[in-house]
Amino acid sequence: MKKEGPRIYGVMAEFDNPTGLVAAARRAYEEGYRKMDAYTPFPVEGLAEAIGFHRNRLPLIVFIGGLIGCLGGYFLQYWISVIAYPLNVGGRPYHSWPAFIPVTFEMTILVAALSAVLGMLALNGLPMPYHPVFNAPGFALATRDRFFLCIEARDPKFDREATRKFMKSLEPREVSIVEY
Amino acid sequence: MLERTHEEMRAEQSLHPVIKPGYTFATVADKISAIVLTRRTPLGWLVGFVIAFTLTMILLYSVGYLLVVGTGIWGINVPVAWGFAIINFVWWIGIGHAGTLISAILLLLRQTWRTSINRFAEAMTLFAVACAGLYPLIHLGRPWLAYWLIPYPNTMDIWPQFRSPLVWDVFAVSTYATVSLLFWFVGLIPDLATLRDRARSRAGQIIYGILAMGWRGSAIHWYRYETAYLLLAGLATPLVVSVHTVVSFDFAISIIPGWHTTVFPPYFVAGAIYSGFAMVLTLAIPIRKFYGLEDFITMRHLRNMAKILLATGLIVAYGYMMETFAGWYSTGPYESYMIINRMKGPYAPYYWGLIAFNVLAPQLLWSRRIRGNVLALFIIALIVNVGMWLERFIIVITSLHRDFLPSSWGMYYPTIWDWTTYVGTIGLFLALLFLFIRFLPMISIFEMRTLLPEAEVKEEVA
């Protein structure tokens, strides 16, 4: 950590194909690295698991959102039709719950969908216009046909030279230092 | 059927590929993004856009005139108070449904062939819903008070009537529009990042950069992204069924002969998917030809869509049959007269046109040769589009123009303003579609990449 030179974000290795990247990510995890991330032009199966990411809270957020929409939608209608503005239509009950189902359903879907999208963006920390990995040479290809693995400097095991040497041993196309 | 081995499936896949062999990650991205970024805007695009834009101006003029004068400029009157506005509303929203079906239901069913058509089918949904949503608003009489439909605390101290299907409609259609927009935009984010990184002009980099929100393709992001996308698909699937069900409730909850029937919700949903797939074919066939995308939108896609068209067409035909059966079996004088009036009354040519277009024409799709003939598919799709419009015409007009009391019978004749508004929304739809094709990737780049054989992670390496 106390190496000379400017503070860096991490070391980045560039791969040609997803197979090489997943193998490298597994190796790095076995080696003891924990703070790392991979960058790919499309979702690669098993990659998130390979870098040790397991906990996904999004389904819970969407469930809670759906529940809020469902209850909120129903009680909005209940409150309006029974308390705030009761209308007597031929003596029918004010609390006519079957008629409230369509709007309750739509509100469930609406709030659940909004929480899925906003929750995904929030957990991912987007929008984030600037991020150090964009400084890595050739990173623009991460949205085209290259696959990147970055071990971050905040990893306790990170050592500028040792990590770099380790990355070289994974047979990437190239290894580079990512600066802030 | 279920006993088919993996090899057999593979063999069939290679016989009818969803993407022509020989592409790599880079060439897929280049080919699709080039349409937006580097290729010169074709003259045909310009001509098409100018025509569509002119029609949009006709729509603006018609709506402007309507706001000044009122709904009296249309052909609606007692007894037919629901004219073109409701016909077109149902027609457009039905067209939108195929987009959601392709993007959500086929995703959940793991139908990989959906990948090259889902993006523009979703765009089609969005623009069709925009056109659809316009009609109930301008049909209100005082459209500037449309916000009264939303429950909000107000000084008049009144609230919407939640037992009315018209209020359900407000919630269903606005939820549908919102969720379709979210689904479409979430699908676009990684592709916007590709465009950001490939754009050469400063303006392109900035605009696509803002829209991509700093997407960097992180593995953890992808993981959450896929979860979100899958959940959205799971939410959109019941939503799409509910939307046309609620639209059918607008009719089915009433007591008008021919409307008050339980077959309406499933029959409306099937009809919506039917007309939507017809519209996808109508759009996909010229676009793939014009932009040379035959490698991505292959014959396999067209054949599959033709099969869905045939299947949903048969469900719709069953709906027509059951309507007739119910009219006879109910022995109610009003119900049975409604059916006889449809077949022999003043609107009989429309009814028989609808049967010919929606029931007879798609039967040609039983033939393998017709399913493989692009021109024939295009013509059948056009015929079905017209047929589905006629279906809504028959449902709305014939039930209203002769109901219970012969002394209050009447006829409905659309005016020039009905037609200009209708043609105008077609213009708006096409104009938005032209802009979409020009400025956004019409095929999902990142999903196409996952279809390539190189995208698979080979396990033995680990």
Image (spheres, rainbow, N blue to C red):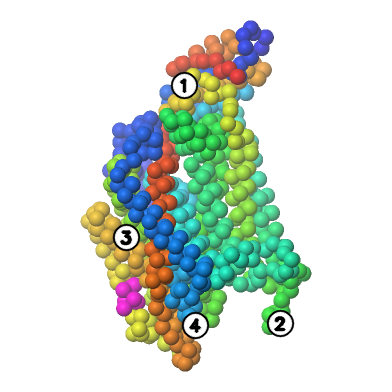
Where does label 4 land, which residue?
A: B78
| Image location of residue B196, percent across then percent down | 47, 32
Q: Which mark is residue B381?
A: 3
Q: Nearer the viewer, residue A162 or A99?
A: A99
Q: Are marks 4 and 3 on the same chain?
A: yes
Q: Secondary structure at mark 1?
A: loop
Where does label 2 land, which residue?
A: A91
Q: Which residues are magenta?
A: B349-355
Q: Secondary structure at mark 4?
A: loop
Q: CA distance from mark 3 to mark 2?
A: 50 Å
Q: Are marks 4 and 1 on the same chain?
A: no
Q: Amino acid under label 2? A: Gly
Overall secondary structure of the magenta section = helix
Where does label 1 land, which residue?
A: A138
Q: Amino acid under label 3? A: Ala
Q: Residue at x 45, y 74 (%)?
A: B74
Residue B86 to residue B273: above or below: below
| Image location of residue B187, percent across then percent down | 49, 43
Give the left or right position of residue B85, taking residue A133 as reference: left
The residue mark sitting in front, 4 or 3, is: 4
For residue A146, say whether it is visible.
yes
Q: CA distance from mark 1 to mark 3?
A: 46 Å
